[in-house]
Amino acid sequence: MKKKVIIPAAFLIAALAAGGLLYFTRANPVEAAATPTSPSAVPVVAGVVAQHDVPIYLSGVGTVIAYNTDIVRAQIQGQIISINFTEGQSVHAGDLLAQIDPRPYQALIDQYTGNLERDQAQLANAQTNLARYTTLGDKGWATPQLLETQKAQVGQLQAAIKTDRALVEAARVQLSFTRLTSPIDGAVGIRQIDVGNIISPSSANGLVVVTQLNPISLIFTLPETVLPRIQQRQANTKAPLSVFAYSQDDTILLGQGVLGLVNNEILQTTGSIQLKANFANQAHKLWPGELVNARLLVDTRHDGLTVAASAVQQGPNGPYVYVINPNNTVEIRPIKVAQIDAGQALIDSGLKADQQVVIDGQYKLQPGTRVTLLHGNAADEAIAQSAQQAPIP
């Protein structure tokens, strides 16, 4: 009898507890609902707007050309008996590069020298006879005809001697041509002929090409719209404008030179102007035929504002950056960019010095998003990951 009473009592207590819980839930719906979690802060990498003097460049693409290029050709025909250079070596003007067999030309010199000495001996004899005949003529023992004949012979021999001397000199010049020497300082290229072959002035490739590497020149192009700016800069300064040559990926400075000239006409097909710069090129970093990026320094912006180029985003209304507010939220700030060079963007308007902007992690942001700043290795890893995920242009 006691067990029957206890069991219904337990059921009654459970029912009352469930009813109380239901009443509490209906009476406090807000407290009963799960409390929503606030969105977590987005990790980003920040950069600071810097203020300093910024050089202003005009950038173009150019080709390196040798200051001088000479094909060493033979001026006479003959057999190559020696090659006196190694391909690729540096040479100086006058260095012997190859030797043509000199014996035929030395024989001509000997022959013409012999003729000269013979005619000189005959002239000496003719002059002696002329002196003798003149003395006899003064005494009436020699006819005028004999004197005139002897004078003509002396004149003839004097002319022959002039011819002999000219022939000897010409033969010596020909002999000098058997030495093929470098006309300039530079580097020799690939040898075009081997020892034992016959070379002549009609040989198409000659012996070798010698290219002058220092100094060296660069021809590059810029849009014709920048011509007035260059002319104004040249008019305002007496010193030539500086030109910097970089590798195609803009990572290696190959040389610093000066602007030599602006070409005297505009290329109508491309609407561009050609400029020529000259470089000392002592380290031989610039090489003939090399395609490089050229930067012409036209001005310096004093106290210019710069940020990392990765901070600049492009929107439908133009470029903008995410500015980090003091409460760690971000806002979009439209900007005007003057130039982007060496990973830095020069800002004309929209930012102030020492402001913080987002330089990595923008793809997760929108106005008002709360951010947390990454530093040190975490920032480096985030930037590296973004670089790997960036689309190839």
Image (cartoon, rainbow, N blue to C red):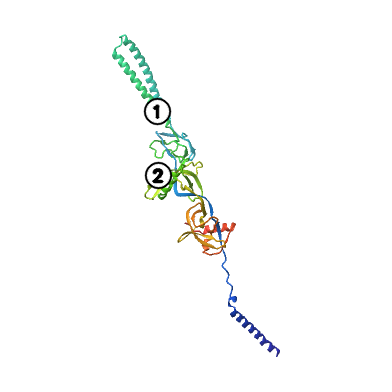
Amino acid on which the number 1 mark rests in the picture: Ala
Amino acid on which the number 2 mark rests in the picture: Asn
Please say if 317 is above or below 180. Answer: below
Residue at the far right: name it: 2
The quadrant in which the N terminus is found is bottom right
- Which image quarter: residue 149? top left
In this view, the residue in front, 247 or 116, is 247
Mark 1 vs 2, N-terminal side = 1
Which residue is labeled 2 in the image?
263
Mark nearest the camera among 1 and 2 is 2
Please say if 357 is above or below 187. Answer: below
Number of marks drawn: 2
Residue 45 in view (yes/no): yes
The image position of residue 80, as x and y in percent, is 43, 35
CB atoms of marks 1 and 2 within 8 Å: no
Disc number for residue 171: 1
Residue 64 in view (yes/no): no
The local secondary structure at tag 2 comes to strand
The image position of residue 109, as x and y in percent, is 40, 26
The image position of residue 107, as x and y in percent, is 41, 27
Tell me the distance, in whole angstroms, between the alpha carbons under discs 1 and 2: 45 Å
